[in-house]
Amino acid sequence: MTELNDIEDYIARMALGDRDAFAALYRATSAKLFGVCLRVLGEQAEAEDALQEVFVKIWHNASRYQVNGLSPMTWLITIARNLSIDRLRARRKAGGGSMDEAEALADTRPGPEALTLAASDRGQIVACMNELSPDRADAVRRAYLEGETYQELADRYDQPLNTIRTWLRRSLMKLKECLSR
């Protein structure tokens, strides 16, 4: 199993253009990052494409990573999640396709690898989400897993935009505290 210090070392070496470090980082983190992309996008083929983009982005931005005592996986997962949400939003803007296109879609259910990855953290995350009030937990899911914008959430909950931002910020702080116990 790869240590977090190893991952930080790979990122630092990548910033210097080390392709071997890139390959090592890919081997160590691609399964987890693929799971993040798949969870957000819901389609295996699109998640695979997104994962490719994620690693290109990591390669180009490795010099921006700063060791700060936090897990380097947080930085990597954030890149994967944000890129996947951007793709999801672009898909929504493009609109749906015809019924013929819908019929040709592959099965979007996650495979065994994705299910195993998701199950490893699911119990703790579910327990922590259950500590949030139902509306806050729903807002977190919609914002960070389904890609809804703050404005969409404000409209949904009939709340001012800044209230939604506060809900999400405080909810994330509670989740972080719970997950670190």
Image (cartoon, rainbow, N blue to C red):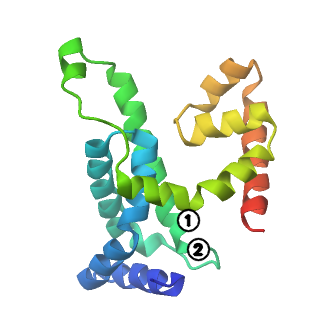
Q: Decide if residue 45 is in sight here.
A: yes
The residue wearing badge 2 is 71
* 173, 123: nearer the viewer: 123
**11 to the left or right of 5:** left
Q: Amino acid at mark 1?
A: Thr
Q: Are marks 2 and 1 in contact (CB under 8 Å)?
A: yes
Q: Secondary structure at mark 1?
A: helix
- Determine the residue positioned at 39% across, 82% down: 10
Q: Characterize the local packing of mark 2: few (<14), some (14-19) or many (20 or more) Cα atoms within 10 angstroms.
A: few
- Determine the residue positioned at 27% across, 77% down: 23
**106 to the left or right of 67:** left
The residue wearing badge 1 is 74
Q: Quadrant of the C terminus?
A: bottom right
Q: Decide if residue 78 is in sight here.
A: no
Q: Which mark is residue 9?
A: none
**Vertical side of 137 occupied by 101: above or below:** above
